[in-house]
Image: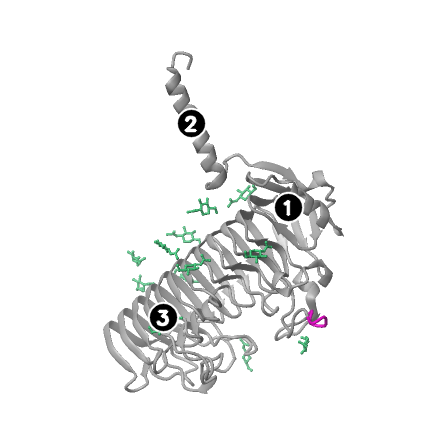
Amino acid sequence: MANLPLILIQIIIIFIFTQSLFATSHPPNPIPITVSVSDFGAIGDGIHYDTVPIQSAINSCPDTFPCHVTFPAPRKYLTATVFLKSGVVLNVEPGATILGGTRIEDYPRESSRWYVVLAENATEVGIGGGGVVDGQAEKFVVREDRRKNVMVSWNKTGACLGDECRPRLVGFLDSVNVRLSNITLNQPAYWCLHIVRSNNISIEDTTIYGDFNIPNNDGIDIEDSNNTVITRCHIDTGDDAICPKSYTAPVYNLTVTNSWIRSKSSAIKLGSASWFDFNHFVFDNITIVDSHRGLAFQIRDGGNVSDIVFSNINISTRYYDPLWWGRAEPIYVTSCPRDSTSKEASISNIHFINITANSENGIFLSGSKRGLLRNLRFINMNITYTRFTNYSGGLLDYRPGCQELVKHGTAGIMMEYIEGLEVKNVEMKWSNYELEQWNNPLEFKPSTVNNISFLNFNSGLYTNSKSR
Ligand SMILES: *[C@@H]1O[C@H](CO)[C@@H](O)[C@H](O)[C@H]1NC(C)=O
Ligand SMILES: *[C@@H]1O[C@H](CO)[C@@H](O)[C@H](O)[C@H]1NC(C)=O
Ligand SMILES: *[C@@H]1O[C@H](CO)[C@@H](O)[C@H](O)[C@H]1NC(C)=O
Ligand SMILES: *[C@@H]1O[C@H](CO)[C@@H](O)[C@H](O)[C@H]1NC(C)=O
Ligand SMILES: *[C@@H]1O[C@H](CO)[C@@H](O)[C@H](O)[C@H]1NC(C)=O
Ligand SMILES: *[C@@H]1O[C@H](CO)[C@@H](O)[C@H](O)[C@H]1NC(C)=O
Ligand SMILES: *[C@@H]1O[C@H](CO)[C@@H](O)[C@H](O)[C@H]1NC(C)=O
Ligand SMILES: *[C@@H]1O[C@H](CO)[C@@H](O)[C@H](O)[C@H]1NC(C)=O
Ligand SMILES: *[C@@H]1O[C@H](CO)[C@@H](O)[C@H](O)[C@H]1NC(C)=O
Ligand SMILES: *[C@@H]1O[C@H](CO)[C@@H](O)[C@H](O)[C@H]1NC(C)=O
Ligand SMILES: *[C@@H]1O[C@H](CO)[C@@H](O)[C@H](O)[C@H]1NC(C)=O
Ligand SMILES: *[C@@H]1O[C@H](CO)[C@@H](O)[C@H](O)[C@H]1NC(C)=O
C-alpha cells in the first residue's frame, strides 16, 4: 500500500465509502450488531412477562444498522405484542420460544394490530435462528369439540366483532425486504403468518404447526403483496395453509417450492377475498397430504387471475367433517360473483404439469357466464379416485356465495363455462368398489365449454386389493 500513488488510495477510500453508503441504504450491512434480550433483563421463565426487556432490546438497536436481537436458549419468553423496527431481525435460538400473551391487554387497542410479533412500515426485518414463536392457541379453546373446537372471541369491548376476535401470530404490514428463515411458528390463536401490503418477502425453512381442530389458524396469508418466495416449508394446519388474498391491491409474483402441506381446509387457496388481480404465481415440487382440498381458486369479487403454474405436485385429498371447508377435490377452479353486488372475473392461463393425485372426489372447474375460465392446461397427470372415509359425497361446492351446495354425482372432471382447455397425457383410475355416487370421467355443462382438446386421455377401473 505504501507505494501506491495517492490518487489510487483516494479512489480506494472513495470506493469503500460509497460501498458502505450503499450498505446502509440498500443491501444490509453484512456485519450486524447483536444484542441479547437477557442483557436487558429478560427472565425467560414463561411465567413473568418479558415484554419490556424485549422491546428495550429492539429499541436499543441503532436506526441505521442491521441488528440481531437474540433470544438465548433454553428459555420461554412470555410477551405482549413485540414491535419490530427497520433493520431488526429476531434471532430465536434453537430451544428458545417467544410465547404470545393470552390476555386482550397484551395487544394494541386496534384489532387490526393484534399480533404476537408485528412489523409495520419496516424494511430489512425478519425472524430466524432455529427457535419457536408460539401463540398458545390451546389456551384460547373454550370448549373442545371432536368436530371443531369452540374458541374465545374478544368481542366484548367492541374492538372487534364476530366470533373470530383473536390475535394472529406474526404480521408484516406495509413492509419491504422481509425475511423469515429457519423458524417454527406454533399454535397461532388465529391466522399464523400474515403478510400485508408488503414487497420482497422471503419465507424459508419455516415450519408451521396449527392444531387440526382449531378454526381459522391459516398458515401463510399473502395479502395485497408482491414478490414473495416461500421455500422448504412444512405447513400443518386446520385452516388454509397458503392463501393469497386481495382486498385493496393485487398480488403479483408468488413462488412456492419444495414444501410439504397438510390442511383440514385448502392446501393452497387463491381467494376468497379477491377484489384485485392475482398474477404470475409458480408452485413447484409440493407434497399435499390428506387435505380437504388441494389446489383451489375461490374467485368471488372481481379480481382477475392469470399466469399460474403448478408443477410436480403430489396431492392426496379426503373428506373431513363438513364443518370444515373442502370436499376432497384435488383441483378446484371456481369463479363466480359472491353476491348480486359482486363483479364477475376471469381465470386464465393456468397450467397444471406433472401432477399425481389420490382423491375421494373429482376435479371441479367452474366459471360463470361472464367470468370464464380461459386457457387451462392439464399435462401429465395421474389421478386415482378411491373412497376411504365414510363421509358422504355427491355435492358440488360453490361456496362462499354463488349457488352454495348443489347435489350432483361425482365426475372425474366436472366442467362449466370454459373457453380453451387442453388435456394431455392424463390417466384417470377408479377404484372398483364403493361405486355409489361415482358418475362419468368427464362431465360438461352443455354449450358452456368450448375449444377443448384431449390427447392421450385414459380412464378406467383398477383393482387394488390393498387400496385404503
Ligand atoms: C405506517 O405508515 C402509514 C402511512 O404512512 C401511517 O399512516 C401509519 O401510522 C404508520 N404506522 C406506523 C406504526 O408507523
Ligand atoms: C437453523 O438454525 C440452527 C441454529 O443456528 C442451525 O443449527 C441450523 O442448521 C439451521 N437450519 C437451517 C435449515 O438453516
Ligand atoms: C362474540 O363472540 C361470541 C362467541 O364466538 C359470539 O357468539 C357472539 O355472536 C359475538 N358477539 C359479537 C357482538 O360479535
Ligand atoms: C429482498 O429482501 C432481501 C432480504 O430479505 C434482501 O437481501 C434483498 O436485497 C431484497 N431485494 C431487493 C431487490 O431489494
Ligand atoms: C404490487 O404491484 C402492483 C402493480 O405494480 C402495485 O399496484 C402495488 O402497489 C404493489 N404492491 C406493493 C405492496 O408493493
Ligand atoms: C414481477 O416479477 C417480474 C420479474 O419476474 C418483474 O419484472 C416485475 O416487476 C414484478 N412485478 C412486481 C409488481 O413487482
Ligand atoms: C422437492 O422438495 C423436497 C422437500 O420437500 C426436497 O427434498 C427435494 O430435493 C425437492 N426436489 C427437487 C427436485 O428440488
Ligand atoms: C377484470 O377484467 C375485466 C375484463 O377485462 C375488467 O373489466 C375488470 O376491471 C378487471 N378487474 C379488475 C379488478 O381489474
Ligand atoms: C405421492 O405421495 C404418496 C404418499 O404420500 C406416495 O406413496 C407416492 O409415491 C407419491 N407419488 C409420487 C409420484 O411422488
Ligand atoms: C415433468 O416431469 C418430467 C419427467 O419427470 C420432467 O422431465 C419435466 O421437466 C417436468 N416438467 C416440469 C414443468 O417440471
Ligand atoms: C404417471 O404414471 C406413469 C406410469 O406409471 C409414469 O410413467 C408417469 O411418470 C406418471 N406421471 C406422473 C406425473 O406422476
Ligand atoms: C365406516 O363405517 C363402517 C360401518 O358403519 C365402520 O365399520 C368403519 O369402521 C367406518 N370406517 C371409517 C374409516 O370410519
- Dot 2 amino acid type: Ile
Q: Is residue 415 above or below residue 310?
A: below
Residue at mark 3 to residue at mark 1: CA–CA distance: 42 Å
Question: Crowding near pointer 1: few (<14 within 10 Å), some, many (20+)?
Answer: some
Asked if residue 155 lies in the magenta stretch, the reply is yes
Query: Which residue ends up furthest to the right in the rendered image?
Result: 48
Quarter of the image for residue 441 reads bottom left
Report the front residue among 395 and 268: 268
Say whether disc 2 or disc 3 marks the residue closer to the N-terminus.
Answer: 2
Residue at mark 2 to residue at mark 3: CA–CA distance: 62 Å
The colour scheme used to paint the residues is one colour
* Residue at the disc numbered 1: 95
Say whether disc 3 or disc 1 marks the residue closer to the N-terminus.
Answer: 1
Horizontal and vertical percent position of residue 393: 47, 82
* Residue at the disc numbered 2: 14
Marks 2, 3: nearer the viewer: 2
- Dot 3 amino acid type: Ile
Magenta stretch bounds: 154-158
